[in-house]
Image (spheres, helix red, strand yellow):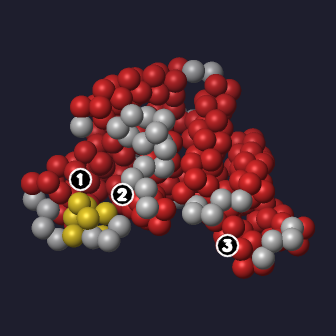
């Protein structure tokens, strides 16, 4: 726990300062580098790693990121294009077809999942985007802390005992409520969201953030690993740190642009 706290104190301030004040190109590059590291970590979780698919995943993520970063509406077409190209790899190799398609599935999952990191940059480009992104960061962090405390002191019913034995229904509910309260408090104070939008986005992040954590835990359970990497002492790798944030930011962006 001490190591986690020290690492958080060293990481959080620079992250918030970067999001709040750094040139937009810097945020773009940082998001891209984080995605490349995450792709590498994801393939490290796949039990049989093939270098061809690892290289392709890095290339495909790069293509999706830079296209979507310039035009958010190209995210879907770029993902589809990388999928079609991925299906051609087994035709060009001499490996066993069952072996190849196992890697097709793993590589496709890695590309699609990590490509959500492009929404960190896409969100920044919205009006008041920096404030929205920082607010979502706080919502995810407060949700996680609240859920952990309620799991420890009030948790009775297991949420997903196989994937994450310590998570409880009570903690999940408390985390979602904490997310809504945070969204209302910060979002209203800085005039980022209307009351309705603050509640909606708070609920989205409260649910999606915790679901994202469970999803990444599923990957690690499959791999038999505690963490996806060792970049952040006490916290794991990039996948471990951005699991809740990536899905929360992507879904919040969709709500803001399509509904709000």
Percent position (x, y) of residue 128?
Answer: 52, 34
Q: Which residue is mark 3?
A: 102
Numbered disc 2: secondary structure: helix
Camera-side mark, 1 or 3:
3
Q: Residue furthest right?
A: 92
Relative horizontal placement of residue 155, taking residue 200 as reference (left or right):
left
Residue in the image at 49% along x and 62% along y: 223
Residue 149 visible, this angle: yes
Q: Residue furthest bottom?
A: 98
Percent position (x, y) of residue 174?
Answer: 21, 56
Q: Marks 2/3: CA distance?
A: 28 Å
- Whether the residues at callouts 1 and 2 have beta carbons within 8 Å, the answer is yes
Q: Is residue 14 above or below residue 117?
A: above
Numbered disc 1: secondary structure: helix
Mark 1 or 2, nearer chain start: 1
Determine which quarter of the picture holds residue 212.
Answer: bottom left
Mark 2 or 3, nearer chain start: 3
Q: Which mark is residue 147?
A: 1
Q: Is residue 61 above or below residue 138?
A: below
Determine which quarter of the picture holds residue 161.
Answer: bottom left
Q: Quadrant of the N terminus?
A: top left
Q: Marks 1/2: CA distance?
A: 9 Å
Relative horizontal placement of residue 226, taking residue 125 as reference (left or right):
left
Mark 1 or 3, nearer chain start: 3
Percent position (x, y) of residue 209?
Answer: 40, 54
Q: Which mark is residue 99?
A: none
- Crowd tier of the residue under label 3, counting other residues whose Cα lies within 10 Å: few below 14, some 14–19, many 20 or above: few
Q: Marks 1/3: CA distance?
A: 35 Å
Percent position (x, y) of residue 59?
Answer: 78, 48
Q: Which residue is mark 2?
A: 210
Residue in the image at 72% along x and 48% along y: 58
């Amino acid at each position: 726990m001490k190591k986690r706290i020290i690492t958080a104190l060293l990481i959080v301030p620079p992250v918030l300062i970067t999001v709040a004040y750094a040139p937009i190109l810097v945020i773009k590059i940082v998001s891209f580098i984080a995605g490349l590291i995450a792709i590498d970590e994801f393939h490290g979780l796949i039990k049989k790693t093939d270098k061809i698919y690892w290289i392709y995943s890095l290339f495909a993520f790069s293509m999706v990121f830079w296209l979507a970063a310039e035009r958010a509406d190209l995210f879907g077409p770029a993902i589809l294009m990388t999928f079609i190209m991925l299906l051609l790899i087994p035709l060009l190799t001499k490996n066993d077809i069952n072996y190849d398609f196992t890697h097709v599935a793993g590589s496709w999952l890695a590309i699609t999942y990590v490509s959500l990191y492009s929404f960190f940059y896409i969100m920044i480009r919205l009006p008041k985007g920096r404030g929205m992104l920082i607010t979502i960061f706080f919502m995810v962090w407060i949700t996680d802390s609240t859920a952990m405390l309620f799991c420890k002191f009030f948790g009775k019913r297991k949420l997903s005992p196989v994937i994450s034995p310590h998570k409880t229904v009570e903690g999940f509910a408390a985390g979602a409520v904490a997310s809504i309260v945070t969204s209302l408090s910060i979002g209203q104070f800085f005039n980022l969201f209307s009351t309705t939008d603050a509640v909606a986005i708070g609920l989205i992040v409260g649910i999606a953030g915790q679901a994202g954590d469970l999803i990444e835990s599923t990957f690690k359970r499959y791999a038999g690993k505690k963490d996806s990497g060792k970049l952040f002492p006490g916290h794991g790798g990039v996948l471990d740190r951005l699991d809740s944030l990536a899905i929360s930011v992507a879904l919040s962006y969709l709500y803001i642009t399509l509904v709000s």
